[in-house]
């Protein structure tokens, strides 16, 4: 079998092994996550516990998937304090507190941001937080949002927003129908088949709207949902699903002109070259969501965590929050973006449900909601 | 030594091009009855010891990987639900099983996964026939296209699929939105390529002479297909079916987005119980139920596969694959199987069009700018703004790097597993151990991503008493993806390895090749050819993985699916457009990688070696 073909064979074998070898080399050198541009070794996470503001070190912030600040802000914190910030985002807002509860014995980090008022009580009673009284620029404003019963100061309010129904005003203008304004309007026959909301079980704004109806209707809230359902309510899985696929005004040209979203959503619907948004929030249908930060119990770098919470209350971060996270800062000192003051006013009297009541009834309400609406 | 190479493909060189069959297919005049090779000839005691050690390593390395990064985290998580205050508490079983909801959920899981599997196989086998047994212009593009759905993040599938089905949408008149049919359609959409690729990989090198012999003896084309070809393909079909069943039974995002909790499955229920209610007792019971369902499915698949597995004569694809012809030339006989080809082509064309619909919908929507059209959203991909800290291109680079790591890991581990599992030892105990090993490595596909993801969070802090916190290590993401990709590699490579006629190995040994050489020249050569498919598959799975990864992703280096998820979580037509454009990038990236892998496969072949 020797002869001219054996040379050809070798060349082919060589081609293949070269190709595979190249792939392997790519993996082992430039292409690998673990070798290139990885500034910190994996063991950095176990920074020594005594690392504090003076000695630098690393502080790990555990937060949900929607946390983001403008580029360079966290770096300026490092410049000021000498503390590096590592951000860990192990899932969405709904799962955050449960993850913290499960990892209580070996916390995922030093500080947490993104516990909202519907989960606040569970976080406090499960003991995942260490008390801290913040000293940042907006500390006094933040105190106004303190969780009822949080006497030790486990949670510090950072931002808030109103979860409200949004309407596609241009749709209603086109159809010569007055847009609904209240929760009760939505059970009227003229608004049949127009509303879409995210699932209360799988989406946190969806749950916030369930709380709005609890706040508005009290014990009779299941009847309200039965009426909504009879009037053609559509339940989508998550916020984006409802807003982009089912809602007519979100850019996805869906069929329904009323959707659950935020009071801060309308400014994003100002068309290019236009001056007015094409959607509006119904301010009499809102539930106020407050997002808190805290120091994790068992943190390896508690002083770093405290400094980070103060930083979240600083004017520069507070001013950045509307643009990067679509929430209102707790600070009354910083200026809101111009289009927010014009098109994204807050609700004057949002519906309220006490955090302790939410914690006590959450599972029951969700089960009842699921049985009533999903069947 | 050159001659061993020659023997391994000797039979394939003699495949006649469409002529009459040459009689019984076989290797080099089978002189050694199967199962009794003199394979240890020439190997001394030291050699035998070394061989034993090599096989031990081949078993231990993958097992250690599986235990550390799958079994252990899952056990820790499930254990949490059964241990209350330090005591084992199994009352959760009675509790969960007394809820009528549980039974409904188990039934729905089985119904959805079962129907989707049957449909995927019925549609996928003709697809494999057309796309892997025939040649036609644009075949590479179609092959890559059908793989794309497999990697699309579910948020995007929600958009691509639901905006077609929603009332007033292009397919709104079908009234499928939020129905059982929509979920099943989406599951088939995701898994069609699994069947096409795993069955096609074997079919394209199946020696056609057996079928030709049957035809020469008077069988109709349909009969020859049914009695000769399909039974030969059965192991690959069963393999593919079990993959599809596992993927469908654990589908999570798809089910939620398209059907909501009304069509909840075991997987969605575990997610709800874990992340929303923190009812670990219920979640653990459901995890066990899921494990039982999955193990049962694997057992059935293993049995079905084992009965049908046989040594097959494999041939060069170049000699087997025919040009696709839909018209009969003048003078050709009427019963030449043209009807079969036409039928399969029609089915495949229809499926490809249906698969393309949501993808086209996605592209069209990504080009929509205000009331007009344009590339604005694509231009915006390079900017860093609107809620993400990296540009889409940076995220794509991260995704590719992670996928390379995951693929290398999956190939090493999966390759070893396939090699071990392809052996057929004589002792029944060893045989059972091997089929157990096979099933074990399939489990990661059948266990909830929430259980694995939360399990990582619970167990990877100082795992096994080591002083390091792996939970925040960048290593964990490719590892988590590799755990999911390993079964894909095994299932792609294994049917080819198992189909190797043992006589080839024996012939090689008889001719004086050492065991290592036999492995390299016989198994290695054939496995490498299936390797291209496996690489593409593993890469695609890694690019699209969003289950366990979403619990681990590090924000300073988010992957593309994570960035898409963040973009689509913000209001405004611009973020929506960018999310869709980024999804198109992910789809193109996947299609390109898959196409390249197939190319690599072809350069590697070409001739005998």
Image (tube, rainbow, N blue to C red):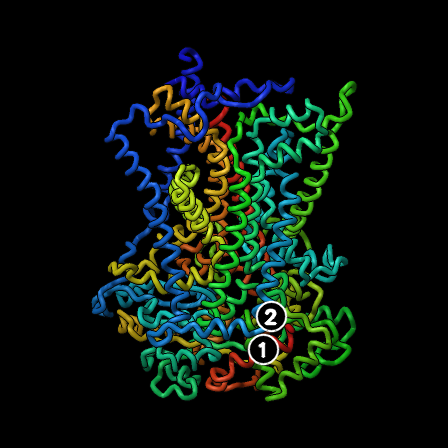
Placement of A61 over or under B515, stated as above or below: below
Q: Assess disc 1: are there few (<14), some (14-19) or many (≥20) residues with their C-alpha within 10 Å of its C-alpha.
A: many
Residue B496: x %, y % from top left: 49, 34
Q: Residue at x 58, y 48 (%)?
A: B191
Q: Chain of mark 2?
A: A
Quadrant of the snapshot with the C terminus of chain A: bottom right
Q: Assess disc 2: are there few (<14), some (14-19) or many (≥20) residues with their C-alpha within 10 Å of its C-alpha.
A: many
Tell me whether the residue at label 1 lies in contact with that at label 2, contact meaning CB atoms closer than 8 angstroms: yes
Q: Residue at x 60, y 82 (%)?
A: A213
Q: Is residue B457 left or right of residue B213?
A: left
Task: State which tag comes first along the sequence, 1 or 2.
Answer: 2
Mark 1 element type: helix
Residue named by callout 2? A198
Residue A264: x %, y % from top left: 56, 72
Q: Residue at x 42, y 13 (%)?
A: A1
Tell me where residue A162 sits by quadrant: bottom right
Tell me where residue A133 sits by quadrant: bottom left
**Same chain shared by disc 1 and disc 2:** yes
Q: Nearer the viewer, residue B378 or B445?
A: B445
Placement of A86 over or under B524, stated as above or below: below
Q: Nearer the viewer, residue A367 or A221?
A: A367
Residue B73: x %, y % from top left: 38, 60
Residue named by callout 1? A209
Q: Chain of mark 1?
A: A
Tell me where residue A205 sits by quadrant: bottom right
- In this view of the protein, can residue A317 be seen by the observer? no
């Amino acid at each position: 079998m020797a002869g001219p073909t054996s040379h050809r064979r070798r060349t082919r074998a060589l081609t293949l092994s070269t190709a595979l070898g190249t792939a392997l080399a790519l993996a082992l050198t430039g292409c690998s996550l673990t070798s290139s541009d990885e500034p910190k070794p994996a063991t950095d996470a176990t920074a020594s516990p005594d690392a504090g503001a003076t000695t630098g070190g690393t502080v790990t912030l555990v937060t949900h998937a929607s946390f983001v600040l403008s580029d360079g802000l966290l770096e300026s914190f490092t410049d000021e304090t000498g503390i590096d910030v590592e951000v860990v985002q192990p899932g969405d807002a709904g799962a955050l507190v449960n993850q913290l509860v499960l990892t209580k014995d070996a916390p995922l980090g030093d500080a947490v941001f993104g516990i909202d008022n519907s989960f606040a009580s569970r976080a406090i009673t499960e003991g995942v937080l260490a008390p801290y009284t913040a000293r940042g620029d907006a500390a006094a404003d933040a105190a106004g949002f303190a969780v009822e019963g949080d006497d030790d100061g486990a949670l510090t309010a950072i931002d808030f927003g109103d979860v409200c129904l949004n309407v596609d005003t241009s749709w209603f203008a086109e159809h010569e129908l007055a847009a609904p304004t209240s929760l009760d309007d939505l059970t009227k026959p003229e608004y049949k088949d127009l509303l879409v909301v995210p699932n209360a079980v799988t989406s946190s704004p969806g749950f916030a709207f369930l709380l709005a109806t609890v706040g508005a209707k009290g014990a009779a809230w299941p009847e309200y949902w039965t009426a909504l359902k009879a009037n053609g309510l559509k339940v989508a899985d998550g916020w984006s699903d409802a807003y982009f696929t089912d809602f007519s005004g979100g850019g996805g040209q869906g069929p329904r002109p009323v959707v659950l979203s935020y009071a801060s959503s309308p400014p994003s619907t100002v068309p290019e070259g236009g001056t007015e948004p094409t959607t509006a929030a119904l301010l009499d249908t809102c539930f106020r969501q407050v997002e808190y930060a805290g120091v994790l119990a068992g943190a390896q770098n508690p002083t770093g965590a405290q400094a980070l919470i103060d930083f979240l209350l600083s004017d520069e971060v507070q001013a950045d929050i509307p643009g990067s996270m679509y929430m209102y800062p707790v600070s009354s000192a910083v200026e809101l973006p111009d289009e927010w003051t014009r098109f994204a006013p807050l609700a004057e009297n949002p519906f309220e449900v006490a955090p302790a009541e939410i914690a006590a009834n959450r599972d029951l309400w969700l089960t009842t909601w699921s049985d009533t609406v999903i069947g | 030594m050159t001659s061993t190479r020659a023997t391994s493909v000797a039979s394939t060189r003699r495949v006649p091009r469409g002529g009459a069959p040459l009689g019984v297919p076989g290797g080099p005049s089978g002189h050694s009855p199967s199962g009794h090779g003199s394979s240890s000839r020439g190997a001394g005691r030291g050699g035998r010891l070394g061989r034993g050690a090599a096989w031990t390593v081949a078993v231990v390395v993958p097992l250690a990987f599986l235990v550390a990064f799958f079994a252990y985290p899952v056990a820790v998580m499930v254990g949490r639900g059964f241990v209350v205050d330090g005591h084992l508490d199994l009352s959760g079983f009675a509790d969960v099983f007394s809820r009528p909801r549980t039974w409904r959920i188990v039934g729905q899981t089985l119904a959805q996964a079962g129907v989707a599997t049957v449909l995927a196989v019925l549609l996928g086998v003709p697809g494999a026939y057309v796309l892997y047994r025939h040649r036609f212009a644009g075949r590479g593009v179609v092959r890559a296209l059908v793989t794309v759905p497999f990697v699309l993040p579910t948020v995007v599938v929600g958009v691509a699929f639901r905006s077609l089905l929603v009332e007033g949408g292009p397919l709104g008149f079908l009234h499928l939105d939020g129905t059982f049919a929509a979920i099943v359609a989406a599951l088939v959409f995701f898994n069609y390529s699994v069947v096409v690729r795993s069955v096609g990989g074997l079919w394209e090198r199946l020696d056609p002479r057996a079928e030709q012999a049957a035809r020469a003896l008077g069988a109709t084309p349909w009969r020859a297909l049914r009695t000769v070809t399909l039974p030969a393909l059965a192991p690959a079909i069963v393999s593919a079916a079990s993959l599809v069943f596992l993927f469908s039974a654990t589908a999570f995002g798809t089910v939620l987005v398209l059907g909501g909790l009304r069509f909840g499955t075991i997987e969605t229920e575990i997610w709800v119980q874990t992340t929303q209610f923190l009812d670990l007792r219920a979640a653990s019971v459901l995890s066990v139920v899921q494990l039982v369902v999955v193990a049962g499915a694997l057992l059935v698949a293993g049995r079905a596969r084992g009965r049908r597995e046989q040594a097959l004569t494999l041939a060069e694809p170049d000699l087997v694959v025919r040009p696709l012809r839909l018209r009969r030339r003048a003078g050709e006989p009427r019963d030449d199987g043209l009807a079969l080809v036409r039928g399969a082509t029609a089915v495949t064309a229809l499926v490809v069009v249906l698969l393309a619909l949501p993808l086209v919908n996605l592209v069209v929507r990504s080009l929509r700018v205000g009331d007009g059209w344009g590339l604005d959203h694509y231009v915006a991909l390079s900017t860093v703004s609107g809620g993400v800290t990296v540009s889409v291109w940076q995220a794509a680079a991260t995704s590719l790097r992670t996928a390379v790591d995951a693929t290398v890991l999956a190939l090493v581990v999966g390759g070893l597993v396939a090699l071990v599992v392809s052996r057929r030892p004589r002792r029944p105990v060893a045989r059972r151990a091997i089929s157990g090993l096979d099933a074990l490595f399939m489990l990661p596909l059948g266990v909830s991503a929430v259980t694995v993801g939360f399990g990582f969070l619970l167990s990877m802090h100082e795992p096994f008493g080591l002083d390091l916190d792996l939970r925040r290590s960048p290593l964990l993401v490719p590892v988590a993806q590799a755990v999911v990709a390993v079964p894909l590699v095994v299932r792609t490579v294994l049917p080819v390895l198992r189909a190797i006629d043992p006589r080839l190995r024996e012939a090689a040994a008889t001719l004086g090749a050492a065991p290592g050489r036999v492995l390299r020249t016989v198994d290695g050569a054939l496995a490498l050819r299936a390797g291209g498919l496996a690489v593409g598959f593993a890469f695609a799975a890694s690019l699209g993985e969003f289950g366990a990864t979403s619990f681990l992703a590090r924000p300073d280096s988010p992957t593309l699916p994570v960035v898409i998820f963040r973009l689509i979580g913000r209001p405004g037509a611009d973020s929506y457009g960018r999310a869709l454009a980024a999804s198109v990038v992910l789809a193109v990236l996947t299609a390109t990688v898959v196409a390249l892998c197939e190319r690599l496969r072809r350069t590697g072949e070409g001739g005998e070696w």
